[in-house]
Amino acid sequence: MTFLEKIKPHLISDDILIQEIVLHALHDYPNVPEEWPNELLKEAFRNKDKQSSIYIENQTFNEEAVKIIILIWMSLEPFVKLLGIFTLIQLTYL
C-alpha cells in the first residue's frame, strides 16, 4: 500500500485535526492526484467550519478547481471578499 493509498481515506475527515495532519503531510508531496484539491475545495464549500482549516498550496489546479473556487468566492460575504482582494494585492508585492 502506497503513501497516497494510506492517506486517501483521511483526506476528507470529519475530524478537522486529522484532516489538517493529512494536509500538512501532502503540502510538499509532489505526486498528489489532480482530483484531490477538487475534493478539498468541495468540502470547504459544503462545510463552512472547515473553510479556514483547508489550505491548498503547491498543488495543481484544473478547470474544475477554478469553478469551485469561483462558487466559493460568490458565496462569501462582501466584507470577506474585500479582505481577500487586499490579501491578494499584498501577496503580489511580496
Image (cartoon, rainbow, N blue to C red):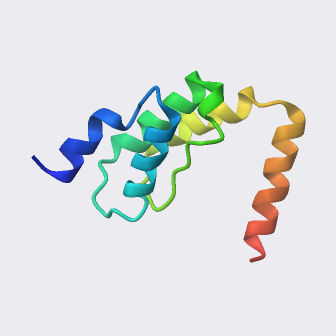
- Residue 41: where, in percent of width, then height? 52, 36
Query: Which residue sits furthest top?
Result: 46
Q: Residue at x 45, y 40 (%)?
A: 19
Residue at 54% across, 42% down: 66
Answer yes or no: is residue 15 visible.
Answer: yes
Give left or right: position of 80 versus 33: right
Comparing 77 with 6, the one in front is 6
In front here: 66 or 21?
21
Quadrant occupied by the C terminus: bottom right
For the residue pair 17 and 51, the one nearer the viewer reads as 17
Residue 75, picture quadrant: top right
Residue at horizontal 74 percent and vertical 70 percent from the top? 92
State the residue at coordinates (34%, 47%). 34
Residue 52 image offset from top left, x and y in percent: 66, 41
Name of the residue lying farthest toward the bottom: 94
The quadrant in which residue 69 appears is top right
| Numbered marks: total | 0
- Determine whether, in the image, residue 27 is placed left or right of residue 54: left
Quarter assignment of residue 74: top right
Give the vertical position of 19 relative to 49 (above or below). below
- Can you say whether 9 is above or below 1 in the image? above
Placement of 14 over or under 64, stated as above or below: above
Up-down relation of residue 55 to residue 79 (above or below): below
The image position of residue 27, as x and y in percent, is 43, 59
